[in-house]
Image: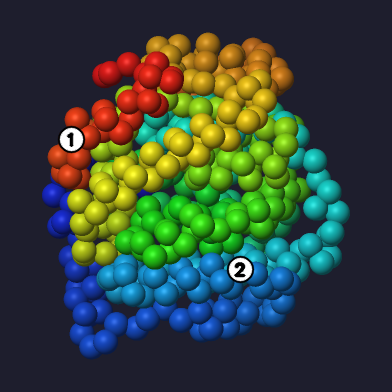
Amino acid sequence: MTPKPVTETSTDYTRPYRPFPVKLLNAAGRIGRPRRLDVDRMVAKARRRTGLSSFGDEWFMEPLSVLVRSINEEADLTLLGRLIQRRRIEGALVTRLRVEELLRHRPEICNIDLGPIVVIAGLQRTGTTTLHRLIASHPEMRAVEAWEGLNPLPLPREEPGDPHTRIRRALIAERAIAYMAPAFFAVHPAEHDAPEEDVLLLDVAFMSQSAEATMHVPTYARWLEDQDHTRAYKEFRTLLQVLRWQRPRRHWVLKTPHHMEYLDVLLDVFPAVTVVRTHRDPLKTIPSFCSMVAHGRGLFSDRIDPLEIGAHWFAKTRRLIELTARVREAADPRRFVDVSYYDLVDDPMAVLGKIYERAGIPFGPDALKAAERTASRNVQHRYGRHVYTPESFGLSREIIEHGMAAYRKRHRIPRE
């Protein structure tokens, strides 16, 4: 089912859209004391679902416990929001159990060479999704598809090479989002069979920005910034090896702004990656992403504070820029490619050629045709127009310009 396009998105963030059955469900959840998420219960449920007991090293229990405590105390989720988050956490625990069991039987997976990797580490709303899909169209390129990001391992009774159950489940999730928040697709096309942010794999370690982008969890967000993410990235690499074991390709393309915050760890765990930085006018990107966060949080909570979202993500954006610049100064400059959003819009094939040349990946006629087909399908506003203003989030042109002046100057970013 293709989501029904909306004319434009709402800017009334404090009153998220609710289909009538969802309103009834959430109203029922307000009767009595809300049931809190419980780590022990979720762990037990994952063990029952899989029939497995060993997680191996249980280092992940600390980030999981911090996350759950923050959700319970700060996120103010609706009943549906709690059900979805509980299911997501249980799913991550199931994945951990099943990966541990797989590697016990197939330890050689950990020796798989991932090949050349292109990592798109640009700020949100700078054309990263468009660029990601264009690069992923290369016949020899591997990306994390949405369906396998949700379920990285073959499900029970799935035949090797036939992930139909996982694809069907991802389609059901896509349809659920389209039903609960039809306008969200105008903000981000969350299609079940398209390349998606590989932060989904970092969710399995309970150490990713996904939580703070979809819920009000400030305690967890602050805690996350102070942690060593090496273990999470090593597990991330293992999951990529598991995916390549199932569906081999010669090259990889990865994409998530999360990588900007921990670029030093990424470069250490993946020493041969080519990093692509995308750049666009912050006056457009920052309020656009704040709007995306507000719409996303509206799926899980009735309490949306646009001013808090603006303050948090403006500070987070500056942090991403500063940390990335610091790491880049100490790294080999040949490992980085800068891409202007405006060049990507004007001549995407030229941008692809520049990236492939730097990464040492052939860009032949078949790859060019595949990219042109992808570009023709991914047209702007096909699900509706995304409307937003900085003032909705307590920001202004002056605040953004002052905070982003050095970034704009460093990368010669024009104003739209």
Viewer-closest of 358 and 107:
358
> Which residue is denoted by mark 2 in the rendering?
60
Q: Position of residue 160 (x, y in %)?
A: 73, 54
Viewer-closest of 39 and 155:
39
Q: Is residue 167 visible?
A: no
Q: Position of residue 17 (x, y in %)?
A: 19, 56
Local crowd size for mark 1, using a 10 Å CA cut-off: few (<14), some (14–19), many (≥20) = some
Amino acid identity at mark 1: Ser
The residue located at (19%, 30%) in the rendering is 397
**C-alpha separation, residue under disc 1 versus residue under disc 2:** 40 Å
The residue located at (64%, 12%) in the rendering is 365
> Given this view, does label 1 or label 2 mark the residue nearer the observer?
1
> Which residue is denoted by mark 1 in the rendering?
396
Query: Is label 1 in a helix, a strand or a loop?
Result: loop
- Sequence-first tag of 1 and 2: 2
Local crowd size for mark 2, using a 10 Å CA cut-off: few (<14), some (14–19), many (≥20) = some
Q: Is residue 115 visible?
A: yes
Residue extending furthest toward the bottom: 32
Up the image or down, 351 lies above or below 319; here it is: above
Q: Position of residue 378 (x, y in %)?
A: 41, 28
Amino acid identity at mark 2: Phe
By what rule are the colours in the image chosen? rainbow
Query: Is label 2 in a helix, a strand or a loop?
Result: loop
Point out which mark residue 150 bears: none
Viewer-closest of 170 and 26:
26
Using the rendered view, name the quadrant where residue 135 is placed: top right
Q: Is residue 185 left or right of residue 272?
A: left
Using the rendered view, name the quadrant where residue 315 is placed: top left
